[in-house]
Amino acid sequence: MTGDHHVYVLECADETLYTGYTTDVDRRLAEHEAGDGAKYTRGRTPVELVHVESYASRSDAMSREYEIKQLSRAQKERLVESK
């Protein structure tokens, strides 16, 4: 992965999609799995990492996270399938 700032999409056990930002994808995934991640993913484990994008700046990554969160479920599914 190029860049130190990452936007990721998880598929939760209830088949919902969660989008987040991190500087360490592996650590963040482990936090979600352990129930220490976002409130949304607690109780929705196990989660599966289905999409990651990397950026050079935090600002770019946070902007992209916001864009993805605004997408419909169908648009998010197409994004995940395109990678």
Image (cartoon, grey):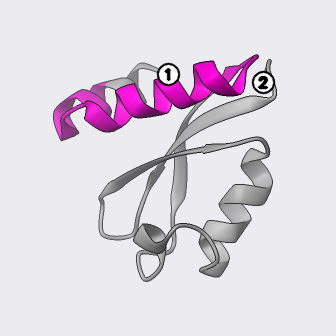
Proximity of marks 1 and 2: CB atoms separated by less than 8 Å: no
Instruction: Give the spatial CA distance, label 1 vs label 2.
Output: 13 Å
**Which span of residues is magenta-colored?**
54-78
Tell whether position 64 is magenta.
Answer: yes
- In the rendering, which numbered label is found on residue 9? none
Q: Residue at x 56, y 40 (%)?
A: 8
Q: Position of residue 40 (x, y in %)?
A: 41, 69
Q: Amino acid at mark 1?
A: Lys
Depth order, front residue of 56/10 = 56
Depth order, front residue of 24/82 = 24
**Helix, strand or loop for disc 2:** loop
Q: Residue at x 25, y 31 (%)?
A: 71
Tell whether position 11 is magenta.
Answer: no
**Helix, strand or loop for disc 1:** loop
**Residue marked by disc 1:** 83
Q: Position of residue 5 (x, y in %)?
A: 73, 30
User: In the picture, residue 68 is in which quadrant?
Assistant: top left
Circle 1 Cα neighbour tier, 10 Å, few/some/many (<14 / 14–19 / ≥20)? few
- In this picture, is 22 found above or below 58? below
| Residue at the front extreme of this rendering | 59
- In the rendering, which numbered label is found on residue 1? 2
Depth order, front residue of 25/50 = 25
Q: Position of residue 9 (x, y in %)?
A: 48, 43
Question: Magenta-highlighted stretch: main secondary structure?
Answer: helix
